[in-house]
Amino acid sequence: MSELDIKKLLKSVVAYKASDLHLVSRSEPQIRIDGKLVPLNLPKLDGQTIEQMCYSIITEKQKKIFEEEGELDFALMVPGVGRFRANYYNTLGEIAAAFRIIPIKIPTLEDISAPPIFSRIVQREKGLILVTGPTGSGKSTTLAAMLNEINKKERKHILTIEDPVEFVHENDKSLFSHREIGNDTKSYARALKYALREDPDVILIGEMRDKETISAALTAAETGHLVMGTLHTNSAAQTINRIIDVFSGDEQPQTRAQLSTSLVAVISQALIPKIGGGRVATFEILINNPAIANLIRENKVHQVYSQMQLNQQQTGMQTQTQLLVKLLKSHLITKEDAIRYSNRPEELKSLIQSL
């Protein structure tokens, strides 16, 4: 197989409106449609074929990194086809690859059916906005739509730090500086350390994966920057605990104090299969207010969930359970999928018995 064939496979991802392409030895190429893997009607691949295909689209430098590290993350632009995020890895001593499509058109908040509160929180001058959820839940798309909203309305310097850079924004009213780990900077923590000298108004952190990065993000949010980031957590309360737990016991009170003042919102999302095809996004929304801030400061995060259920018309908050019940009543999703994707299945079951 040749370079042409991998481009044909990536074309099929676009043609079938799939999200991912998987190349693994002893299997035919497979694509993910609406969250489910579907084999393409092609011969099974072997490791040598995959290696030839994968090596045909990367540089010598990337090849060297992959051979030394055993992993490689990069973004790939295929003219006339689209933009992809790629990961190469080894399985039983053979190369395998996963490609995810990145839409070239930057989504708007309307495109992702975002609640009105989203356009209000991106108007904030400073603080921390976290978008969380499992891999493939659309976190990057939500953040791209939020940055797009700022870009359309405000003159700001937006600095993105990603591994690799996914959505590439055109400068509208705002000015974008996209920085890629590995090419433009060595690490998230290092990029954040120097970010404050680059005069940004908004900083996007692709993944808040370690103590150093989280600490730098909290500091940036406190010092007059709007910071957006992602975490692999499933609920608002779990997100707060994850951030605090990264720090040692004696550092936690200060982290709680920092988080209570700098947090703007936590949006926890999942993509759930729709009846009849496609997927629908569910957003659990926590908006920081004096009551929530107090619970974070006093280490009573377990009470945050019940606080989220109060005065929602005024606060703009919503729980995932409420949204799942609404989707069930609208006959958009099945009960089985609602329970499977729920972060509080017991609570959901008791509410939907009557439906």
Image (cartoon, rainbow, N blue to C red):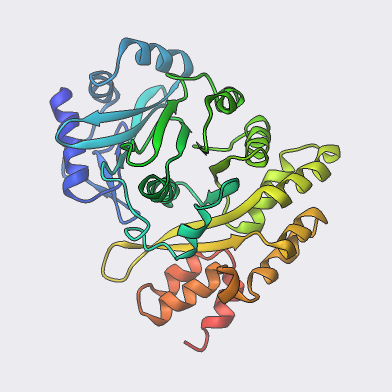
All told, the count of numbered labels is 0
Measuring 55% from the left and 46% from the top, which residue is drawn there? 232
**Is 193 on the left or on the right of 255, as rendered?**
left
Name the outermost residue toward the right. Answer: 250
Image point 14% across, 35% down: which residue?
A: 80
Corner quadrant of residue 26: top left
Query: Visible in this render: residue 168?
Result: yes
Above or below, comparing residue 95 to residue 35 in the picture = above
Residue 161 picture location, percent across and down:
48, 31
Q: Find residue 2 and report its image quarter.
A: top left
Q: Is residue 292 above or below residue 327?
A: above
The quadrant of the picture occupied by the N terminus is top left
Q: Residue at x 35, y 39 (%)?
A: 167
Please provide percent x and percent y for residue 140.
42, 45
Whether residue 1 is visible, yes or no, is no
Give percent across and percent down for residue 299.
81, 55
Q: In this orientation, which residue lies closer to the viewer: 243 or 286?
A: 286
Left or right, 115 with reference to 2: right
Position of 37 with respect to 312 (left or right) is left
Q: Residue furthest bottom?
A: 354
Q: Nearer the viewer, residue 195 or 104?
A: 195
Residue 102's spot in the image, x, y percent? 31, 41
Residue shown at 26% from the left, 25% from the top: 50
